[in-house]
Every structure is written in structure tokens, then in C-alpha cells.
Image (cartoon, rainbow, N blue to C red):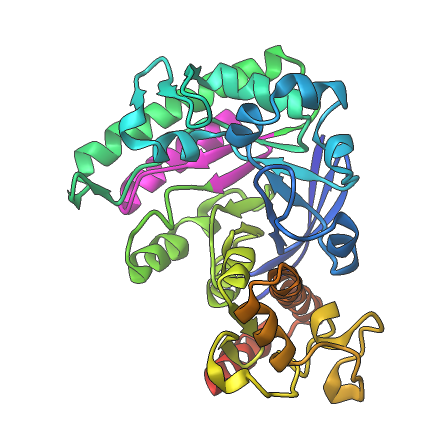
Amino acid sequence: MLQFDLLATDPASHARRGRLTLNHGVVQTPIFMPVGTYGTVKGVMPQSLRDMGAQIILGNTFHLWMRPGLDVVQSFGGLHAFEQWDKPILTDSGGFQVWSLGAMRKITEEGVYFQSPVNGDKLFMSPEVSMQIQTTLNSDIVMQLDECTPYETQGRLTTEAEARKSMEMSRRWALRSKAEFERLGNPNALFGIVQGGMFEHLRQESLQALVEMDFPGYAIGGVSVGEPKDEMLRIMAHTPHRLPATKPRYLMGVGTPEDLVDGVACGVDMFDCVMPTRNARNGTLFTRYGDLKIRNARHRADHQPLDATCTCHACAGPQGIAWNDGGRGGFSRAYLHHLERCGEMLGPMLTSIHNLHYYLNLMQGIRDALDAGTFSQFHAQFKADRARGV
């Protein structure tokens, strides 16, 4: 089941406010979706995700197929009970991970033959197999199997002919994914994925073909695959607002806080990215006033929180009162620097909570601005704050 209600639009951009109703709950859009590759958002308890306002998370079809295996997940009735998350879940198709295997895989019209990176077994992924796996996972949003068109092929830019060939196969795989999804009687929602590389006219062809198939929602794939930022922004500006206004729009694998706000302005409703948690584990933290490298020596004796305006558990403690509002319950930069320097696991746990809270709070601010009709002002203030520096 999927129902999308368009609640508000911004007259000065393509930004929109919506409500997405799925089998496991309601998602307010625009939304950022934390990535839980193996059935867990790394280092973050499900209750912490609920506390910070996460409405929907991701699972990875390929990795969950490899481990723990479909028999284990099926014994729990799907991912929700297995990972103790009662809100919506989106699963990717597994295509990106198979594509990333490089020499360990062979892509054909039938599907992808590859060697398991876990135990070396010879395996096969097709649109039908992907739909079968995702039906077992019982995710609320299922993604078609597609081929991720690379920005570069063997050290050179992917040609238009190569991008077309890839896009057209993804289009045929979309038809097969839809047919198998319906044959299985999956009660959830299947999204089609727009491909076409860095070529706008190919993106448009892909988009039109998918719209004719009448998917409940649409994603934009094949970005954040090594292309320069200006190329990604060009495709982001071209594609989302050309998708049906009555369907949700998902930009896959993007990105920085700036990408999210700019993406909303281009008409995107849904985002995901590993950046908040991956950067947290590497000591890079997002704040209202720019990015902070907690491992830098200048933080060794710093009594300030990461962000005085933040109400996450790392910055404000369990009471959730920001320092600039009189709270003093969180952890100092000095303490987090110490944990990072010592390799203590609490360090990346706290910084992951902070980064995810920052992303989710940013999206809440966007939704509030769209509700109030002040998105343009919000966008300008966001850019000014981030440029100010920590």
C-alpha cells in the first residue's frame, strides 16, 4: 500500500511538502532516511532512532540476502520484527552492490552472475530474484532491479551509447520487476528508477517510459557514482520536477546537507545516504555552522558541545535542552575528542547520533518552512549559517 498526499508547494521553487502513507506507518516528506545496511543503522539503537525523529530507514537487499540469509529473516516474518523496527522500511534492489563487485560479476540481459564476497558461492541476481528477496524482507518500499550506469568506464567517461544501452536494459528490467512483484502479490509499493547517466535526454526517455508503467513512486538513480558535484547538481536540477506531481520522488544516495536542501528545492521528497554515520565514524561532524573535525588537536580541552543549538543526546543530554537555551547536559568536544583518540566505541556511537539528529532536524526545519510558506528564507539562512563556520 502507498498513498501520497501533496500538502503544500513553494511558489519560488519546485519544493513540496507531502505525506506518505505506507503499510507500517506515515512518513512526512521531505524526509531523510538513515541507512541500515545489515538491518541496523551502525552504532544506533532503534529507540534512539525513534527519539531523534526517524520515520523510515533503509535495509540492503544484497547484504541481507548474503547474511543472515532469507530463511532467518523469513522466520521472523520480515525485517521489521527481525530488527525491532515497527516503522516503514525501504530496501534497495541489490543492483548497486552487485555493480560494485567489478570483476567478480557478469551483467547479462537475463540478470547478473556473480561470486559471493562472503563465501565465494556462485550466485545469480535477476529482476525476479530481487523481487522475491524483497518480498521476503517485507519492506514497505521495494526498488526495481536496475543497472547503475557508471560515470566512468575503464578510466574514461561513459559514452552516450553506453549510457543508453544501460538505461534501456534497466527499463526492460523495470517491466520484469513489476510483473514479478505483481505475480508475488506483494502488498507493499514498488518504485521505478530513472537512469540515463549524465545525459538529460536519456533521463527524459527513461522517465517517460517509467511513468507509462505507472509505478507508485519513482527514484533517480545513477548519481553519486564518482561524477563531479556540478554534474550531479545538473541531473538533480533536471529530473525530479519532471516526475508526476502525484507520486513520491526519491533521490538515491545523496548526500551532504547542502545537497538535501538544494534537492528539496528541485522537487525531491526522499533522500538517503551513508554520509551521516560514515563521516561520524571518521570524526567528521555536521553542525548548523559548518563541519567539524573532532580529531583535531584544537578540541582537546574544548568545553563546548559539538553544536550549541543541537538537542541530540550527544550535545544536550537526555533532557534535550540545547546549550544556547540554558542546557548543560551533553558531552563536550574535549570528551568526544578523547574518545576518538582512544578508539573508544562510545565515540562513534555518540557522533553517529549527532549527525543523524542533525540531518533529521534539518528535514524537520524544511517541512516547517514549507508549512509556513517560508522555504526561500529558510534556504538562504541555511546557506549563510553553514558558510559561517564552526
Residue 186 visible from this viewpoint: no
Residue 318 visible from this viewpoint: yes
Q: Nearer the viewer, residue 86 or 229?
A: 86
State which quadrant residue 98 falls in. Answer: top left
The structure residue drawn at horizontal position 25% and vertical position 32%, both measured from the top left corner, is 164
Up the image or down, 233 lies above or below 297; here it is: above
Assess whether residue 217 is covered by the magenta stretch. Answer: yes
Up the image or down, 370 lies above or below 89; here it is: below
The structure residue drawn at horizontal position 57% and vertical position 75%, both measured from the top left corner, is 337
The structure residue drawn at horizontal position 77% and vertical position 36%, both measured from the top left corner, is 24
Picture mark count: 0
Q: Which residues are magenta?
A: 190-219
Assess whether residue 148 is covered by the magenta stretch. Answer: no
Residue farthest to the right? 319
The percent position of residue 105, horizontal first and vertical second, equals 32, 23
Relative to residue 8, is residue 256 drawn left or right?
A: left
Residue farthest to the front? 342
The percent position of residue 259, horizontal first and vertical second, equals 46, 62
Residue farthest to the left? 156
The percent position of residue 30, horizontal first and vertical second, equals 62, 56
Q: Nearer the viewer, residue 237 or 130?
A: 130
State which quadrant residue 162 falls in. Answer: top left
The percent position of residue 291, horizontal first and vertical second, equals 49, 75
Quadrant showing the N terminus:
top right
State which quadrant residue 9 falls in. Answer: bottom right
Relative to residue 33, is residue 124 drawn left or right?
A: left
The structure residue drawn at horizontal position 80% and vertical position 84%, both measured from the top left corner, is 327
